[in-house]
Image (cartoon, helix red, strand yellow):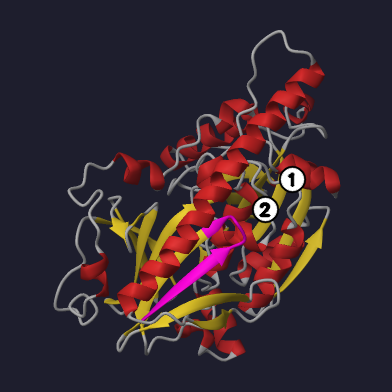
Amino acid sequence: MKRTLVLLAVLLPGIASALPNSITGPVFNSQSPLNGKDLTKELMGPDIWDGSTALPGEWTDEGQIASSSVSYLMARPKLFGRDLILLRAVRRDGKLDSLEATFVDAGSYFGYFDEEVPEGMGRREMRKEVESRLAEKQAEFTKLYTDAHAELRNSIAATTGNDKPEEVKVGRTRGLRTPVEEWHTDQLRVRLLAGENRLLRVSIFKTSSESDQWLDPAVSALPPRAKLDKLAAEVERDADGTVLIPNLQPIPQGYRPYCGLNSLAMAARHFGLHLDEDWLAVAGGFQNTGRADGSNLVKLYHTVAAEAGFGLDRTTKFDPSAASRALSAGFPVIVWRRFSQERNTLHSRFMRQFDADPSATLPDPANPAERASWPSADAPLHASVVVGYNSPRKEVIFLESWTGKDKPRRMRVEEMIATTDLCFVFRP
């Protein structure tokens, strides 16, 4: 198990350096007139909440979570006097339901920690140099987090006219239930989530909104049987034998060791949970090291399943029968599998080939040369989300966390069985 958790953080250098930060990259590069402008007055005013005034700026769609649509602002304004990393809007039935502002995030700050050192150093010197650089960066981040936390508390109190926030808890399961501070006005609540020296996030929403759980109200209101029927109804079955969950949305991980987190966030949002990889990193015990070392991802997977009201089976093998039963019922499957650049290139190429010619086939796994090209036992691990299968073709269909909204890839079931290290099968 220790090997699994360590290797999950390690992508091949060629892949890691090519990963786009598909959300914050464009936001940081946007030349919006709102950059640097403090939007506190506009966003706390009544007009945008009653629908009489539109939100300022250009917004990009991020996806759907049950009855809610999520978008983010293509700008870097200020809020409560502090620079933002990202501002999201959540709309329900076409009306603004909440705003979510991220001010400090360790995942974006540390990324994949750069361990390049000057040539000619011995192993001990290299280790000391890396440790020194990391310690310096950790100290810088801790100061950033501490200062921002104090300033946000003071600014929110001044804006709301309330210097005594209420402490409430959000979430239902132990691993995701977290205390937050809330300041109230006549119409709004301002919530500050302070995530253990990793994440500072402020949410603004109407006083009347349901907001003490991560599960979308439209899903939490359903009886258990109706939840299962809803998942099953979303599954597509094609004439060629393909069974597919079509609406599960990729969440690009950016230049961060978050493949395991982003894959889990994809499944969580599919179940109607308003969770993202940044908060999951806090809940999973990620450290400020630019790696996944020391986190408890396996426990986090079970916690997220429980938060959605479902179970989760974990195995060290990929079982096609168990996976097909889950997928047929609308439950995605997450695999931690051995990864190689060569196979990633092949699956990417075949994705495009199959899109142009549905009669195209993957290489025959009975060929010894083909099997020899599969990642070996010492290859780094990577998390993928299996969203479908085709029994006649003996293929599994999977999504990655670095390809934005590209089409799912395909892999022979034999390769998936041979390269899976851990498999997580969600169930009722």
* Residue type, numbered disc 1: Asp
Q: Which residues are magenta?
A: 189-199
Residue 196 seen in the current view: yes
Secondary structure beneath dot 1 equals loop
| Real-space Cα separation, disc 1 to disc 2, in angstroms | 7 Å
Q: Which residue is mark 2?
A: 286
Q: Is residue 283 left or right of residue 153?
A: right
197 in the magenta segment: yes
Q: Looking at the rendering, in which quadrant would you find the C terminus?
A: bottom right
Q: Is residue 69 left or right of residue 110?
A: left
Residue 320 seen in the current view: no
Residue 327 percent across, percent down from the top left:
63, 65
**Residue at (50% x, 39% y) in the render:** 351
Q: Are marks 1 and 2 in contact (CB under 8 Å)?
A: no
Q: Main secondary structure of the magenta part?
A: strand
Q: Which residue is mark 1?
A: 293
Q: Is residue 378 left or right of residue 154?
A: right
**Residue at (55% x, 40% y) in the render:** 111
Residue 93 percent across, percent down from the top left:
30, 80
Q: Nearer the viewer, residue 407 or 172?
A: 172
Above or below, comparing residue 209 to residue 141 in the picture? below
Q: Nearer the viewer, residue 130 or 244?
A: 130
